[in-house]
Image (spheres, rainbow, N blue to C red):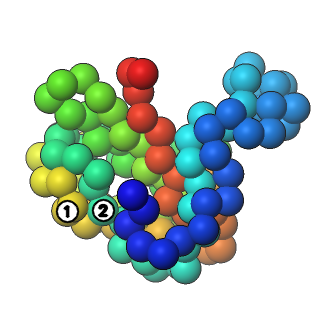
Amino acid sequence: MWPGDFRQTQGFGENPAWYRPYGIAGHDGIDLAVPCNTPLFSPSAGVADETRVETGYGYHVIVRTDDGHEFLLGHFSRIDVVDGQWVAAGEQLGLSGGYRGAPGAGDPGCGRRSPQ
C-alpha cells in the first residue's frame, strides 16, 4: 500500500552490480517517485530515531516499533520530528525532496523494513 498514486522506481534487491562495491547484495529498500514537498507519514506507531543526514538516504527518519521492527524513510527535504519522539501510525514525519543530504530533486520516500 503506497501513500498515494506514486510509481515505484526501485525495489528490494535491484541493481546488484551498482551496490556490490558497498558490500550490499542489492538495493535494500523501495524508492517511490513523488513530487518534492510531498508529506511523508509514519507507516507504524513507534519512536522516531536517527533523524539525521546519512550518505545514500539523505535526511532520514527511522521509526522503531514496540515489536522490534524498524522502518527507515529517506530523502526528506524537511524533518518534523525529533529523536525519541513517539509517533502515531500515519503521523507526518516531514516533507520529501532531499537526496544524499541535499534538498532538491531525488527519489524521495525510500523505506526499509527489518528484521525480516
Q: Secondary structure at mark 2?
A: strand
N-terminal of the pair, mark 1 or mark 2, is 2
Where in the figure is residue 63, as x and y percent of width and height?
29, 42
- Label disc, if present, on residue 99 of the rendered structure: none
Q: Which residue does the image show at 73% across and 23% down from the upper left?
A: 25
Toward the right, the furthest residue is 17
Identify the residue shown where x is 53% and y is 78%: 36
Position in image of residue 8 (x %, y %): 61, 60
Mark 1 Cα within 10 Å, few/some/many (few <14, many 20+)? some
Q: Is residue 111 left or right of residue 22?
A: left
Mark 1 in CB contact with mark 2 (< 8 angstroms): yes
Q: Amino acid at mark 1?
A: Glu
Q: Is residue 106 above or below residue 49?
A: below
| Image side of residue 109 versus residue 84, left or right | right
- The answer to which image quadrant residue 66 occupies is top left
Q: In the image shown, does 13 or 64 lie closer to the viewer?
A: 13
Instruction: Read off the residue under disc 1.
Output: 91
Q: Quadrant of the N terminus?
A: bottom left
Say if residue 111 shows up in the picture.
Answer: yes
Residue pointed to by mark 2: 41
